[in-house]
Image (cartoon, grey):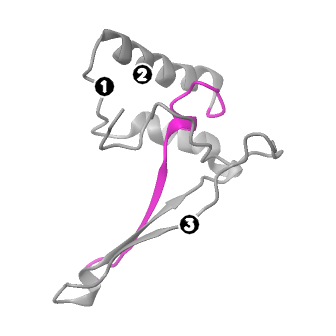
Amino acid sequence: MLTDSSYNLDERVNAIGKERINPYQPVGTTITSVIDCREGHENPMDGFVIEEGAVPHALAHFFQAMLDLMPNKKEPKENLLKRTEAALARYGGRVFGPYYKKGAAGRTQVYLVMSHDSR
């Protein structure tokens, strides 16, 4: 499925740290690539850098709550089955926590965006 979002993807991302490491499903590394958008701006402070990330175990439940409260989530529009699967993943994560195998949190890619503010 092509998507313009990294929330509740079709594949498991494993971007949430765990207390005990599972060698068969390791948590993805943080920052293995960078999208550098700092050049080409009149003011160098207008640029930014995007990197992929992982959520530490201590913030796993906070991450689940943050996903639940995230504004402007895009729901699948393909068909009733896809919409139902997305809803079950979302609600399953709320009931069983961020480590629920079929939950939305485990299938969400995390991005770190670094830029400058106006101050």
Is 108 situated left or right of 113 in this image?
right
User: In the image, which residues are magenta?
Assistant: 98-119
- Single out the residue that lies furthest toward the front: 1
Q: CA distance from mark 1 to mark 3?
A: 28 Å
- Hey, what amino acid is under mark 2? Ala
Q: Quadrant of the C terminus?
A: bottom left
Q: Which mark is residue 76?
A: 1
Extreme-left residue of the structure = 42
Q: Residues within 10 Å of mark 2 (few under 14, many from 20)?
A: many
Judge the density around disc 3: few (<14), some (14-19), many (≥20) Cα neighbours within 10 Å. few
Callout 1 secondary element = loop
Q: Are the residues at dot 2 and dot 1 in contact (C-beta closer than 8 Å)?
A: yes
Which quadrant of the structure image shows residue 50? bottom left
Instruction: Name the residue carrying label 2.
Output: 86
Q: Which residue is mark 3?
A: 31
Q: Secondary structure at mark 3?
A: loop
Q: Left or right: 100 with respect to 118?
A: right
Q: Is residue 105 magenta?
A: yes
